[in-house]
Image (spheres, grey):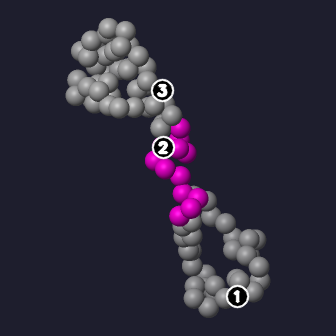
Amino acid sequence: MKYVNAESIFPAELLKEIQKYVNGEMVYVPISKGSRKKWGENSGIKNDLNFRNREIRQQFSDGITIDQLSDQFFLSRDSVKKIVYSKK
């Protein structure tokens, strides 16, 4: 989050109205609900985890054991089980 000067983005009338409530203070303006992104979409980790999970499922279907997958992907056996037995 970066600081932006209100004079550079708000019309003069709106700025005067805002100054009636807050003058010389910093104000956080949250993202509107409709434009909010889900967890992991900004960083790309969601896609990375989906790719990893597809790889785990593929290797499991090719005969690699849960213990081997656990060691290979540095996950607990229970985490690997959740991935391979999920419906996705």
User: What residue do we see at 67% from left, 88% from top?
Assistant: 17
Mark 2 vs 3, N-terminal side: 2
> To which residue does mark 2 refer?
40
Q: Residue furthest bottom?
A: 20
Mark 2 vs 1, N-terminal side: 1
* Residues under numbered marks 2 and 1 in contact, where contact means CB atoms less than 8 Å apart: no
- Picture layout, residue 69 above or below residue 42: above
Q: Indicate which label's residue lies in the foreground, 2 or 1.
A: 2
Q: Is residue 34 magenta?
A: yes
- Picture layout, residue 50 above or below residue 35: above
In this orientation, which residue lies closer to the viewer: 38 or 58?
58
Residues rendered magenta in the picture: 33-44
- Mark 1: which amino acid? Lys
In this orientation, which residue lies closer to the viewer: 68 or 16?
68
- Mark 3: which amino acid? Phe
> To which residue does mark 3 refer?
51
Q: Indicate which label's residue lies in the foreground, 1 or 3.
A: 3
Q: Judge the density around disc 1: few (<14), some (14-19), many (≥20) Cα neighbours within 10 Å.
A: some
User: What residue do we see at 57% from left, 88% from top?
Assistant: 21
Q: Image quarter for residue 28?
A: bottom right
Q: Is residue 29 magenta?
A: no
Q: Residue furthest top?
A: 63
> To which residue does mark 1 refer?
16
Q: Secondary structure at mark 1?
A: helix
Q: Considering the image in quadrants, where does the N terminus appear?
A: bottom right
